Amino acid sequence: MEGVVYSTRLLNPRSGKDEVVMEVWIEKLSVCINEMDGAYASSSPHSAINHFGTFNLPETFCALVKDYVAKKSAFEEGNTKLFAVLKARLAPKKTQHNKIV
């Protein structure tokens, strides 16, 4: 499967700073992967600082990326719902220091 390779500027979650990173957009999967261990759904590539062309990625790797992004998306959706419910239930108790048994 072909991937478009380019450099772009992204916020590094570890350092909190904008950094130039190498990224690959896989059009068939509508997924971007980058060197900061990022993989996420994206209908198009980020704006490129430099464009390095395209190259073929192994099908086995692409299958892993597709599976990872699907599971990551499902987790993020579930995680958002879970904490919304917890915040709603615990809002009345926000001034209490409850002992967890």
Image: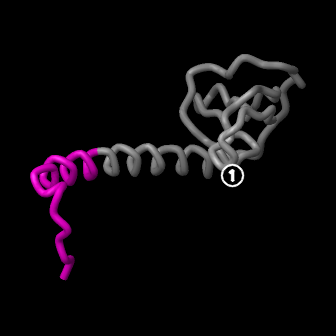
- Left or right of 65 in this view: 101: left
At x 13%, y 57%, the residue is 93
Q: Quadrant of the C terminus?
A: bottom left
- Count of numbered marks: 1
At x 77%, y 26%, the residue is 8
Q: Tell me where the magenta segment starts and ends, as one range.
A: 81-101
At x 84%, y 26%, the residue is 54
- Residue 39 inside the magenta-drawn segment: no
**Secondary structure under the numbered disc 1 in the rendered image:** helix
- The residue positioned farthest toward the front in the image shown: 95
- Residue 85 location (% of width, % of height): 18, 49
Instruction: Name above or below for residue 2 compared with residue 79.
Output: above
Q: Which residue is mark 1?
A: 60
Categorize mark 1 by other alpha carbons within 10 Å: few (<14), some (14-19), many (20+).
Answer: few
- Residue 69 location (% of width, % of height): 53, 44
Q: Quadrant of the N terminus?
A: top right
- Residue 16 location (% of width, % of height): 65, 41
- Mark 1: which amino acid? Thr
- The residue positioned farthest toward the left in the image shown: 92
Main secondary structure of the magenta stretch: helix
- Residue 95 inside the magenta-drawn segment: yes
